[in-house]
Image (spheres, rainbow, N blue to C red):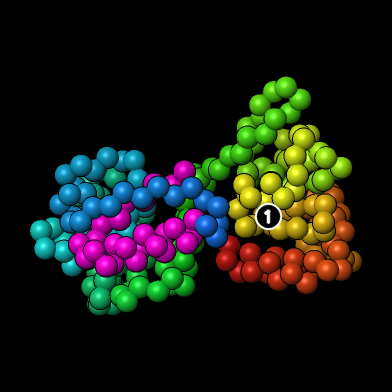
Amino acid sequence: MIRLALVEDTPADIALLQSHIEQYKQETGLELVCDVFTDGAMLVESYTKDYDMIIMDIEMPLLNGMEAAAEIRKRDDGVIIVFVTNSQEYAVKGYEVGALDYLLKPLNYFAFSQRLQRALVRLNTTIEQYIVIRVNREIQRLNVADITYIESDKHKLIYHTTKGQFVTNDTIKRAVSELPKRFVKGNSGCLINLQHVDAIKNGCAMVGEDSIPLSRSRKADFQEAFLRHIGEN
């Protein structure tokens, strides 16, 4: 789970940012929890080191974003701060308080998603996402980052991970609904984690020592997704 603090005094911008966050959640499958503050003073007054990221307007009436960030940095030098502003000039000053990035108003989803992706890459070493599967009569918790690919065998799924194989009664369709978009079908019976793909060679996805055939109908889409994943990461 990733905890965000959204600090913005304009209701319309709050609604727009919340909409962008919700869309990003739907597209990536990440669990993002967002608390809203309508002024920097509210955030500073109740601040604890529970947040992974702060998205904060600079121009606010009681305590502006720069002042709030300076106070927060006294308590938390690790939280990621992304400023929202009408002026690029204000945004540049944000680096003085260790801001990672800034968003210029009016806010559009593409710019927002790119900034958020950059911030999440910075957080990548601490963010973990898990799924739970049933293996025989036991419940097994799997770190999504450890899953290299998932193979369908009749009514069973074989989860290939960096820590071994786990077999459960399930379907590819349901597995897709639980996993982030970096898991892409290479063929009708295999879901591959792009993070573990080393190369695409001779019509196959190379995952560690395994060579997974790509079907003719999915090869082009898989290659495109792989190249996009490399560009984003």
Residue sticking out furthest to the top: 137
Of residue 213 and residue 190, the one placed in the foreground of this image is 190
Q: Is residue 28 left or right of residue 122?
A: right
Instruction: Where is residue 48? Give x, y as percent.
Output: 27, 40
**Residue depicted at 40% across the width and 74% down the height:** 108
Q: Is residue 90 left or right of residue 120?
A: left
Of residue 181 and residue 176, the one placed in the foreground of this image is 176
In the image, residue 2 lies in the stretch drawn in magenta: yes
Instruction: Where is residue 49? Give x, y as percent.
Output: 31, 41
Residue bounds of the magenta highlight: 1-25
Q: Secondary structure at mark 1?
A: strand
**Residue depicted at 44% across the width and 58% down the height:** 22
Crowd band around label 1 with a 10 angstrom C-alpha radius: few (<14), some (14–19), many (20+): many
Q: Is residue 169 left or right of residue 24?
A: right
- 120 shown above or below 200: above
Instruction: Where is residue 202? Give x, y as percent.
Output: 89, 66
Q: In terms of secondary structure, what is the magenta stretch mainly? A: helix
Instruction: Where is residue 157? Give x, y as percent.
Output: 79, 41
**Amino acid type of disc 1?**
Phe
Of residue 224 and residue 155, the one placed in the foreground of this image is 155
In the image, residue 11 lies in the stretch drawn in magenta: yes
Residue carrying label 1? 183
Q: Quadrant of residue 12?
A: bottom left
